[in-house]
Image (cartoon, rainbow, N blue to C red):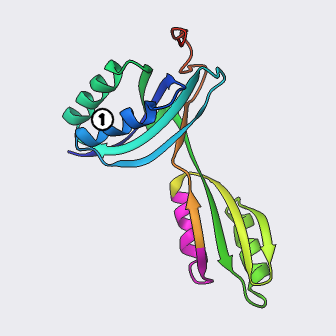
């Protein structure tokens, strides 16, 4: 049975690492749903969060293979019940006449923030769970979505546990 899962990976922050990791997913027949990467509190390392869908056997094999990559320092499957998962979205919405106020009010209700306004358009920034972002998109669809972009998920474990809770070896 296929399941949706999020994996956080601490890697050496250097060129080529992302390519090797994404290639491994492709070789194992996994489609990457979302992929985010960024610096960490230690500039020698980057943190990657990947979401994908697959069965348990393939997921276990993928995690073993990821752990074997030289530049991978730590791999962790994030447990949904113990993880804060968030995504960022910016959406440009068509606003004609009195529709501007309605769109601004709706963005406020959904926890969004207007980051740009021009005659006929408004850009709203929103952060949250994917279901909330989807609900907002569904709501403003009637006004006319001109374009939007979304980041992949980022994930942090709740409580005091950290990906760096145990020191990772120094990057070379």
Viewer can see residue 136: no
Q: Where in the figure is residue 55, as x and y percent of width and height?
A: 22, 40
Looking at the image, which is closer to me, 32 or 56?
Answer: 32
Which quarter shows the N terminus? top left
Mark 1: secondary structure: helix
Where residue 122 appears, as percent x and y from the top left, is 74, 74
Residue at the location (54% across, 30% down)? 47
What's the residue at 80%, 77% (across, down)? 118
Q: Is residue 49 above or below residue 60?
A: below
**58 shown above or below 166:** below
| Magenta part, dominant SS | helix
The number of numbered badges drawn on the structure is 1
Q: Is 105 covered by the magenta stretch?
A: no
- Where is residue 167, by image quadrant? top right
Circle 1 is placed at which residue position? 24
Q: In the rendered structure, which segment of residues is drawn in magenta? A: 131-146
Q: Residues within 10 Å of mark 1 (few under 14, many from 20)?
A: some
Q: Based on the displayed image, in which of its 4 quarters is residue 77 positioned?
A: top left
Q: Is residue 134 magenta?
A: yes
Q: Quadrant of residue 171?
A: top right
The residue most toward the bottom is: 97
Residue drawn at point x = 63 percent, y = 67 percent: 91
Residue for point 73% across, 89% down: 96
Residue 162 position in % (x across, y down) = 57, 20
From the viewer's side, name the closer residue of 97 and 159: 97
For the residue pair 92 and 60, the one nearer the viewer reads as: 92
The x and y percentages for residue 43 are 64, 23
Inspect this view and state whether residue 36 appears: yes
- Would you say 26 lies left or right of 118 here? left
């Amino acid at each position: 049975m296929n399941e949706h899962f999020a994996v956080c990976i601490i890697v050496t922050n250097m060129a080529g690492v992302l390519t090797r990791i994404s290639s491994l997913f492709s070789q194992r027949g996994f489609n990457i749903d979302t992929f985010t990467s960024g610096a960490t509190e230690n500039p020698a390392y980057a943190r990657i969060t990947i979401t994908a869908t697959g069965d348990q056997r393939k997921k276990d094999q993928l995690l073993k293979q990821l752990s074997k990559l030289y530049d991978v320092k730590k791999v962790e499957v994030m447990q949904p019940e113990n993880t804060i998962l968030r995504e960022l979205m910016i959406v440009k919405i068509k606003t004609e006449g009195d529709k501007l106020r309605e769109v601004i009010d709706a963005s406020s209700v959904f926890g969004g923030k207007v980051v740009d306004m021009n005659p006929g358009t408004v850009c709203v920034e929103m952060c949250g769970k994917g279901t909330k972002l989807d609900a907002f998109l569904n709501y403003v669809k009637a006004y006319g979505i001109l374009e939007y972009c979304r980041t992949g998920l980022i994930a942090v474990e709740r409580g005091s546990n950290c990906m760096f809770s145990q020191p990772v070896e120094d990057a070379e």
